[in-house]
Image (cartoon, rainbow, N blue to C red):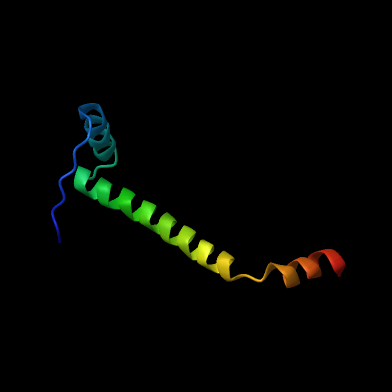
Amino acid sequence: MKNLTIRMPDDKASRLKALAQSRNISVNKLIEELSTIELTEYDAQVRFQVRAARANVTPAMYRVFIV
């Protein structure tokens, strides 16, 4: 594991601490969970973009509008 130091406004840090407390987890665990969600969404977006770039739209459009 690595240590990561981040800087953020005090009010945001306080809100994150309150959110973590409301979920009965540490701020560290909260940040880990939030980053997992964001990374998962990013990975899905990249996969979609790669598939879309490889797609051959013409045959698919032909089937939808002609058949």
Q: Residue at 62% of width from left, 70% of height from top?
A: 55
Please identify the quadrant where the C terminus is shown: bottom right
The image quarter containing residue 21 is: top left
Q: Residue at 48% of width from left, 65% of height from top?
A: 47
Above or below residue 5? Residue 8 is: above
Q: Position of residue 63 (x, y in %)?
A: 80, 70
* Left or right: where 20 falls relative to 54: left
Above or below residue 15? Residue 46 is: below
Q: Position of residue 19 (x, y in %)?
A: 29, 36
Q: Residue furthest right?
A: 67
Front residue of 39/50: it is 50
Q: Position of residue 18 (x, y in %)?
A: 25, 33
Above or below residue 51? Residue 31 is: above
Taking the image as drawn, is residue 26 in sight?
A: no
Taking the image as drawn, is residue 51 in sight?
A: yes
* Left or right: where 49 falls relative to 17: right
